[in-house]
Image (cartoon, rainbow, N blue to C red):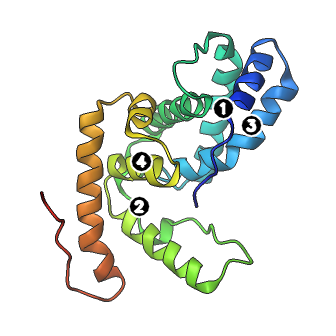
Amino acid sequence: MSFTPRPDEVDQQLLRAVAGGDRAALATLYRAYHPRLCQFLTRLTRRTDLMDEIVNDSFWIVWQKAGGFRGDSRVSTWIIGIAYRCGLKALRRDGPDDLDSLDDDDLPATAAADEPAEQRELRDWLDKGLSKLSWEQRVIVELVYAGGHSLEEAAAITQAPVGTLKSRLFQARLKLRNLLPALAGDAAPLKENLP
């Protein structure tokens, strides 16, 4: 599932209102970002109770720090960065078991009721492939491909160097190119085209 980017001007207006103590503006941001954050957080954990806690903690920080937003990035980058750091903190507190241990049984049931079977099958196949990646690789794939963030924005979110993220993304694509055919029943792995 990918998300259509929201106009940053709208989010900036809402954030200014939140900085002024407007709870309705916070509720609007929460409703707008909740599905996106949950989708992103599935790459860190499959525990929905923990995801809800992370989203709530993130918006508590948004409420407290809205006045400190300097506009160095899009509001979405700022909010997802907060959720990422809250997620890592929660996982460290609850134990790192979640980070690299995603089994096929842990995959979320994200199919829409009216989604065609072919779309559902493709998404399930990709989710199985993503579950085989390290959590660092899953996060960068989610940010760049599903979230539509540039590598620079992903670097701001994860507070990691762009070069590190490029390497993780390259390794994730290489691993997926080798894993996905096997998951589809075709055991012939593909080779990454190197320059």
**Neighbours of disc 4 within 10 Å: few (<14), some (14-19), many (20+):** many
Mark 2 near mark 3, Cβ–Cβ under 8 Å?
no
Residue 85, position as x, y percentages in the image = 48, 30
Residue that badge 2 annotates = 102
Q: Are marks 3 and 1 in contact (CB under 8 Å)?
A: no
Give the mark nearest the N terminus, 4 or 2: 2
Residue ID for mark 3: 30
Q: Is residue 134 depicted above or below 25 in this figure? A: below
Q: Dot 1: what SS?
A: helix
Question: If you read the primary sequence from the N terminus, does the residue marked by circle 2 or circle 3 appear first?
Answer: 3
Q: CA distance from mark 3 to mark 1?
A: 15 Å
Point out residue 163 in the picture as x, y percentages from the top left corner: 24, 36
**In this rendering, which labeled residue sits more in front, label 3 or label 1?**
1
Could you tell me residue 155's position as x and y percent? Answer: 38, 32
User: Which element type, helix, strand or loop, lies under badge 4?
Assistant: helix
Cα distance between the residues tagged 3 and 4: 21 Å
- Residue found at the very far left of the displayed protein: 195
Q: Locate residue 136, reporting x and y percent.
A: 34, 46
Tag in front: 4 or 1? 1
Q: Is residue 97 visible?
A: no
Sequence-first disc among 3 and 4 = 3
Which quarter of the rendered picture does the N terminus lie within? bottom right
Q: Amino acid at mark 4?
A: Val
Identify which residue is drawn at 25% across, 64% down: 175
Q: Residue under label 4, please give it.
A: 139
Q: Is residue 126 above or below residue 52?
A: below
Residue 31 falls in which quadrant of the image?
Answer: top right
- The residue that disc 1 covers is 8
- Between disc 1 and disc 2, the foreground one is 1
Give yes or no for contact between labels 1 and 2 (Cβ–Cβ under 8 Å).
no
